[in-house]
Image (tube, rainbow, N blue to C red):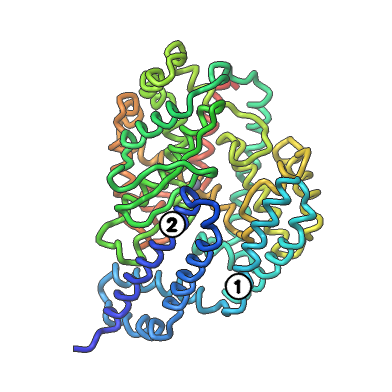
Amino acid sequence: MPESAWEFVTRAMAELRALGGAVSVLSWDQETFLPPRGGPARAEQLAALQGIVHERLTDPRLGEALARAGDEVAGDPERAAALRALRFDRERAVRVPGRLVRALARAQSEGVEAWREAREASDFARFAPRLETLLGLRREQAEAFGVPAGGERYDALLEGYEEGMRVARLAPILSHLTGWLSPLVDRLCAAPPPDDAFLRGRFDVEAQWAFTLELLPLLGFDLAAGRQDRSAHPFSTGIDPGDVRITTRLFETLPLSSIYSTLHEAGHGMYEQGLPERWRASVLCSAPSAGLHESQSRLWENLVGRSLPFWKGMMPRLARRFPSMAAVPPEAFHRAANRVERSLIRVEADEVTYNLHIALRFELELAMVRGDLSVADLPGAWNDRSEKLLGIRPPRDAEGCLQDIHWSFGDFGYFPTYALGNLYAASLYAAARRELPGLEAGFETGAFAPLLGWLRAKVHALGRSLPAEEIVRAATGGGLTDEDFRRYLVGKYSSLYGV
Ligand code: ZN
């Protein structure tokens, strides 16, 4: 019997998943173990594999099968969802001409190199021409993807990370958010900062490493279906629900850094481990959006990991690794772990000021994509906006507009997903608390399984079968809002800071 259209699609999806997994392993290895002289060969290996992925995805036979398979899967919502997701990916891949794909790949590798040098020297001029090129190519790419009706070019870029999200929806949410965050930051920064003297000093990195490895299985990260290694910039990579790689970083004088990196990446990792195994060869075996993925990391990092019950449970364990901690009450550690301050660097920002860093980047990249802000004017605009939003002016571009890697790839549209992740995290957590009595008291005894089980059922198990906001709506009863986040932050920090 000849192969049905659905069978063809199934075979193509399985192959794409396998190839994508191989790309992920090679990229993970590049960031963790690859010896420096292996770099050029690795770039070739990745480019070759990604070329094959692109070929398979844009294969006209797949297009025909996708068109015909709709009738065959009628009445089967899972298969219909897989077809819809694969069509979405394929259409975006098909619409961008090969010439533009190659030009972007070249501009990205040149961009990253120029950005590293520019940041090292804090010299924006060295990066500016590359950024100009990337911006031009991304605008061209947005046109190729297709600007949604009534929308704008930035929407077409945003769509790659957050399907269905539009500037018209996002911009008011972010400006509402900054509207109440800024005065909250003012109030908190006017109050005396919590004492964190006990976090100063030297903390053996091997003991830090051992503590993070102790944390992982307690949270529910399955070390038989994943591993943790070290890298300069922490990240997570889901190869398969049975093979999830995360990394952390260790600084002798910053003991919180490794703990919160591990908690963050474990949140991403547990999401990947919780994707349904029956979909491991399907396009549905992934998150529907970057924002929803980020909600899982921020939930474990902040809502759980910066709570008092968490530290009531963890302090004895921490004290076994670091005897000086035995004298620190959990309440004091909790306050120190929630220190709020105006700072320059996004990745080190506390959870109150963090979204202001995102709002700054969103405003500026939107203005650049729209053509309202020239690349040459970026550093000045950054510094002015930083002063206004964050109350702090970077002394050098390395600590200003050159600090993040994203624009060196021309990744415009990615930053706002971090803020969406924070909002989704707060809403999901609030719903979990309503539905699971005693949830937080359980953290004191290391009982994280009820929370993970709830997230598995409400979020992880759905993979990419529904849009992110629909998953959140089904889990919480409400869509995208900053209400739960506001209630959480104001409640927590008012009591911590007594303001
Ligand atoms: Zn993350």
Image point 48% across, 52% down: which residue? Answer: 34
Which residue is under mark 1? 147
Image position, residue 232 (x, y; %): 54, 43
Instruction: Please tell me which of labels 2 and 1 falls first in the chain.
Output: 1
Q: From this view, report whether residue 8 is shown above or below residue 452.
A: below
Cβ(mark 1) to ligand 1 < 8 Å? Answer: no
Which residue is under mark 2? 468
Q: Secondary structure at mark 1?
A: loop
Question: Badge 1, how many Cα within 10 Å: few under 14, some, many 20+?
Answer: some
Specify whether 387 is left or right of 147: right
Which quarter of the rendering shows the N terminus?
bottom left
Image point 54% across, 27% down: which residue? Answer: 252
Image position, residue 57 (x, y; %): 43, 76
Image position, residue 73 (x, y; %): 27, 77
Q: Residue furthest left?
A: 1
Specify whether 321 is left or right of 71: right
Image position, residue 339 (x, y; %): 58, 26
Image point 49% across, 20% down: which residue? Answer: 333
Q: From this view, report whether residue 116 is shown above or below residue 326.
A: below
Image point 65% across, 53% down: which residue? Answer: 362
Q: Mark yes or no: residue 426 visible.
A: no
Count the marks: how many?
Answer: 2
Q: Amino acid at mark 1?
A: Val
The CA span between labels 2 and 1 is: 21 Å
Q: From this view, report whether residue 139 is shown above or below residue 221.
A: below
Which image quarter: residue 307?
top left
Residue 45 or residue 362, whichever sits in front: 45
Q: Secondary structure at mark 2?
A: helix
Residue 226 or residue 477, whichever sits in front: 226
Q: Amino acid at mark 2?
A: Ala
